[in-house]
């Protein structure tokens, strides 16, 4: 497996360098959450070990990945921005697509302040942040995490856009967590990426209940045929087992839930 920066010129160079023997190599675009957590690398490594497939992983926001896929620069997508994915499908760019993993979104913030929000639901917590003018850092990058954050502000009846306490990075999950930590600010995170970075940050989790985060796997229409093989494996018992082992090795607990098990129930 090879991980690549998600820039079109670099993708073009990779495709050119792959040559004939790498026709079976597919480019998988994955949200920065599952890349920063190490999860997708672990799953892909299991796939490569079990098959003859070869995968290069591109980490970017869901919207950016969908844009790259529309230009034919990605073969396979793992995204968690459902509205953007639906638009992508409606335009005929998807071959096959279905929900595959589920994790959780979390709200984290500076210790000493988060305790006052514990036990709130999402809307109440975001409303309290706005009312207290508490520092908040947003990805604002077209990611699924950003979409969930926007939905939370809507539920709270708040538009934070021009507020001095609200700052944006336009960057991925890992960097945005670092900025929030440096500024002692609140931030929406994905559970796996949070667990990977938590020991290096001073932020703590706010207990606001269940906040599901569903990832979809999509084969891009017109992409390499090997993308279908990866899709089939990902939704198979072998793929489910790879997810279980990745959770065990990375976190020691089930952070990413494979949705195949639910579909298999009578």
Image: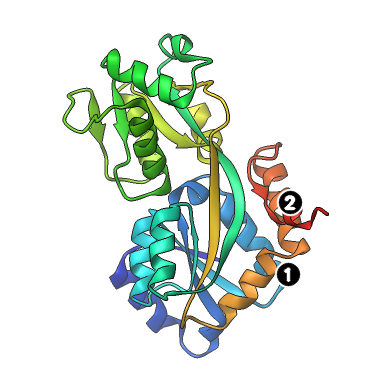
**Foreground tag (2 vs 1):** 2
Image quadrant occupied by the N terminus: bottom right
Residue 163 figure quarter: top left
Q: Mark 1 Cα within 10 Å, few/some/many (few <14, many 20+)?
A: few
Q: Position of residue 86 (x, y in %)?
A: 43, 62
To which residue does mark 1 refer? 50
Observer able to see residue 236: yes
Residue farthest bottom in this picture: 20
Tell me: residue 25, above or below residue 1.
below
Give the distance between the C-alpha atoms of the residues marked 2 and 1, in whole angstroms.
24 Å
Helix, strand or loop status at disc 2: helix
Q: Which residue is mark 2?
A: 262
Label 1: which secondary element: helix
236 and 183: which is toward the camera: 236
Mark toward the start of the polypeptide (2 vs 1) = 1
Q: How many marks?
A: 2
**What residue lies at 38% left-to-right and 77% top-to-bottom?**
72
Q: Residue furthest right?
A: 266
Q: Quadrant of residue 9?
A: bottom left
């Amino acid at each position: 497996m090879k991980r690549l920066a998600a820039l079109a010129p670099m993708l073009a160079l990779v495709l050119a360098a792959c040559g004939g023997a790498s026709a079976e190599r597919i480019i998988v675009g994955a949200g920065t959450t599952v890349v920063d957590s190490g999860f997708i690398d672990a799953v892909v490594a299991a796939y490569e070990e079990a098959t003859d497939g070869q995968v290069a992983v591109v980490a970017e926001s869901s919207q950016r990945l969908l844009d790259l896929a529309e230009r034919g620069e990605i073969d396979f997508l793992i995204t968690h921005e459902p509205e953007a994915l639906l638009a992508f499908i409606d335009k005929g760019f998807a071959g096959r697509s279905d929900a595959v993993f589920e994790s959780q979104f979390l709200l984290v913030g500076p210790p000493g302040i988060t305790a006052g929000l514990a036990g709130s639901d999402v809307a109440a917590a975001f409303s309290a942040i706005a009312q207290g003018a508490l520092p908040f850092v947003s990805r604002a990058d077209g990611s699924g995490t950003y979409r969930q954050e926007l939905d939370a502000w809507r539920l709270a009846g708040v538009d934070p856009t021009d507020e001095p306490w609200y700052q944006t990075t336009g960057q991925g999950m890992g960097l945005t967590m670092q900025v929030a930590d440096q500024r002692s600010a609140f931030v929406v995170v994905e559970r796996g990426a949070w667990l990977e970075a938590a020991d290096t940050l001073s932020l703590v989790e706010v207990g606001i209940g269940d906040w599901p985060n569903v990832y979809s796997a999509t084969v891009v229409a017109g992409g390499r045929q090997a993308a279908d093989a990866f899709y089939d494996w990902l939704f198979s018992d072998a793929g489910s087992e790879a997810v279980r082992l990745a959770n065990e090795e990375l976190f020691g607990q089930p952070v990413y839930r494979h949705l195949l098990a639910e579909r298999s129930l009578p």
